[in-house]
Image: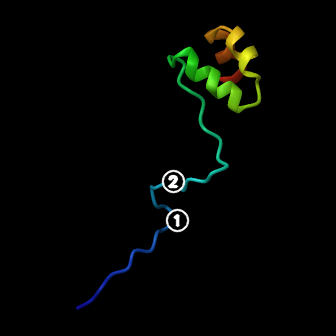
Amino acid sequence: MLLRRHHPRADDESPEITENAPAPAPGRSALKAEWIAYAVERGLDQDAAEQLTREQLIEQYGG
């Protein structure tokens, strides 16, 4: 019986996940709490993030 082994190819569609990979920005329609968490992950103080509007967070951190 012939057994096949799985050898991932360079064009394999499953992305490699690393611990240090930055999370993508939330969608523009995401809740303010998601934008706050995203901004805090990028170094903004929690209290400062909560003082900003969702639109300000999107402008500063959403690109």
Query: SS at mark 2?
Result: loop
For the question of whether residue 63 can be seen, the reply is: no
- The residue under label 1 is 10
Q: Which residue is rendered at x = 76% and y = 22% of the image? A: 45
The one nearer the camera, 61 or 34, is 34
Looking at the image, the residue that sits furthest to the bottom is 1
Residue 47, image quadrant: top right
- The residue under label 2 is 15
Crowd around label 1: few <14 · some 14–19 · many ≥20 (10 Å): few
The relative height of residue 15 versus residue 34 in the rendered view (above or below) is below
- Amino acid carrying mark 2 in the image: Pro
The relative height of residue 40 versus residue 20 in the rendered view (above or below) is above
Residue 53, image quadrant: top right
- Amino acid carrying mark 1 in the image: Ala
Looking at the image, the residue that sits furthest to the left is 1
Q: Quadrant of the C terminus?
A: top right
**Labels 1 & 2 near each other (Cβ < 8 A):** no
Horizontal side, residue 53 vs residue 15: left or right: right
Q: Which residue is rendered at x = 57% and y = 15% of the image? A: 32
Q: Position of residue 39 (x, y in %)?
A: 69, 25
Q: How many marks?
A: 2
Q: Earlier in the sequence, mark 1 or mark 2?
A: 1
Q: CA distance from mark 1 to mark 2?
A: 10 Å
For the question of whether residue 29 can be seen, the reply is: yes
Horizontal side, residue 46 vs residue 25: left or right: right
Q: Position of residue 35 (x, y in %)?
A: 61, 21
